[in-house]
Image (spheres, grey):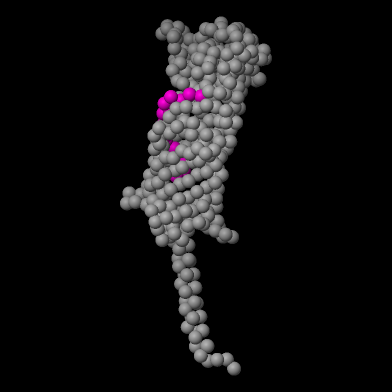
């Protein structure tokens, strides 16, 4: 026969446990309902064990920034599209750490930026959130402070970094690139960036002081012979109007920039973050680096490689040789490379003998040459773009410019 006194002892305990479990269940359900996003809210799918939940990011941030909740989350992990983030929490601040993260930046291209280690510290204040962003690779680290204002629709984040060593920036962002292991990089980077999430709209301003690159071997291009298939020896500079037209069409700051144009890059990032189509901001020097070394993959790593080569080429080759090589190698559509071959193929004359209007039209092909040539075959030359190039050409008198604009309508290239 069962002991009645033992039954009396178990009954209250079981009732208390049942009530506690019921309260925990109600609290968990209430929390999940509270975290559930509205249709237009900024949201993210999170995987917690076998369960995948859609949660409102602003609510999650607000909840996670509370000390008592952060303490409960300490040591746990969140699986997201960028990688697995480990949570570390103290009374003062919380930290998210991601090893081998992959971040897709639509403003640069579809290929993800691979980061060896990302650490994001954050704390809540009366005005919003603040903390630091640390990126680490190859025993190097870059750290920048950030502040953020967050609401249910998104977040506005400001990042400011002053006097960051360019060697560290290059080593961290390009830790898996062969060029980074051999290049000697000096200089300081100052950065101001505004990022709007979840749309990833970017506004950035940056400057690089004393930025120099050595060790990539671009000095070998000083006397390099290029393929005859591009229409002649690279040792013979092209004179006349075509170099002026190419600079006007592709890189109007060519004579003054150090291989890159920081303002154009910032403008392209902002423009690309608002549009589906990607617009480049490559200088002629960067385009030459793409032709010779990097290819044209749409990725942050390729842009970094291109930048390193461009900066070194400015220092080893100089403007004249860079322009000479670009004109000798640039693609002009239909498997035509080089200005000399292009001039003879489409205009029946030497590149040095083309008129200002002809030079402007040839330069207009450099942006998507095959599409431009198809347009010529179906509806004639792009008169608007060709005219704008003539108007932008330097070292041309007013009368000659006017004659060139008038000549454009009569151009009949052999496309």
Quarter of the picture holding the C terminus? top right
Q: Is 257 located above or below residue 85 in the figure? A: above
Q: Is residue 140 visible?
A: yes
Q: Is residue 359 visible?
A: no
Along the horizontal axis of the image, is 83 left or right of 19? right
Q: Magenta stretch mostly in which secondary structure?
A: strand
Residue occupying the point 47% across, 18% down: 254
Residue occupying the point 54% across, 13% down: 321
Quarter of the picture holding the N terminus? bottom right
Residue 180, given in percent of the width and then of the height, sits at 56, 31
Corner quadrant of residue 116: top right
33 or 364: nearer the viewer: 33
165 or 122: nearer the viewer: 165
Residue 68, given in percent of the width and then of the height, sits at 41, 61
Residue occupying the point 49% across, 12% down: 244
**Per the image, is 323 magenta?**
no
412 or 323: nearer the viewer: 323
Q: Is 294 located above or below residue 330 in the figure? A: below
Along the horizontal axis of the image, is 74 left or right of 100? left
Magenta stretch bounds: 197-213
Hey, which residue is sitting farthest left in the picture?
126
Along the horizontal axis of the image, is 193 left or right of 337? left
313 or 51: nearer the viewer: 313
**Per the image, is 209 magenta?**
yes
Residue 400, given in percent of the width and then of the height, sits at 45, 7
Residue occupying the point 67% across, 12% down: 228
Corner quadrant of residue 351: top right
Along the horizontal axis of the image, is 348 left or right of 43? right
């Amino acid at each position: 026969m069962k002991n009645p006194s033992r039954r009396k002892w178990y009954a209250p305990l079981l009732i208390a446990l049942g009530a506690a479990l019921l309260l925990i269940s109600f609290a968990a359900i209430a929390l999940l309902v509270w975290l559930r996003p509205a249709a237009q809210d900024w949201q993210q799918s999170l995987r917690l064990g076998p369960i995948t939940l859609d949660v409102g990011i602003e609510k999650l941030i607000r909840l996670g920034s509370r000390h008592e909740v952060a303490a409960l989350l300490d040591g746990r992990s969140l699986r997201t599209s960028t990688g697995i983030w480990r949570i570390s929490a103290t009374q003062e601040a919380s930290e998210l750490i991601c090893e081998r993260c992959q971040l897709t930046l639509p403003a640069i291209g579809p290929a993800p930026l691979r980061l060896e280690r990302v650490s994001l510290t954050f704390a809540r204040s009366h005005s919003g959130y603040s903390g630091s962003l640390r990126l680490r690779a190859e025993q190097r680290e870059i750290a920048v402070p950030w502040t953020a204002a967050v609401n249910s629709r998104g977040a506005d984040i400001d990042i400011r970094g002053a006097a960051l060593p360019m060697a560290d920036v290059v080593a961290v962002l390009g830790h898996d690139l062969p060029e980074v292991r051999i290049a000697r990089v000096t200089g300081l980077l100052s950065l101001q960036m505004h990022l709007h999430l979840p749309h990833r709209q970017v506004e950035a301003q940056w400057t690089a002081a004393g930025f120099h690159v050595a060790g990539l071997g671009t000095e070998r291009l000083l006397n390099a012979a290029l393929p005859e298939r591009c229409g002649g020896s690279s040792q013979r500079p092209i004179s006349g109007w075509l170099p002026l037209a190419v600079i006007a069409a592709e890189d109007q700051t060519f004579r003054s920039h150090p291989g890159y144009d920081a303002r154009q890059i910032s403008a392209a990032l902002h423009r690309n973050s608002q549009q589906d189509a990607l617009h480049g901001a490559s200088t002629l020097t960067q385009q030459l680096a793409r032709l010779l070394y990097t290819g044209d993959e749409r990725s942050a790593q390729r842009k970094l490689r291109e930048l390193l080569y461009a900066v070194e080429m400015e220092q080893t080759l100089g403007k004249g040789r860079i322009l000479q090589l670009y004109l000798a190698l640039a693609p002009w559509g239909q498997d035509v490379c080089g200005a000399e071959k292009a001039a003879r193929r489409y205009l029946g004359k030497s590149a040095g003998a083309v008129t200002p209007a002809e030079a402007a039209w040839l330069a207009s092909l450099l942006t998507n040459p095959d599409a431009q040539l198809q347009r010529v075959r179906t509806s004639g030359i792009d008169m608007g773009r060709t005219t704008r190039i003539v108007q932008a050409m330097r070292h041309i008198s007013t009368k000659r410019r006017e004659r060139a604009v008038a000549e454009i309508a009569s151009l009949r290239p052999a496309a």
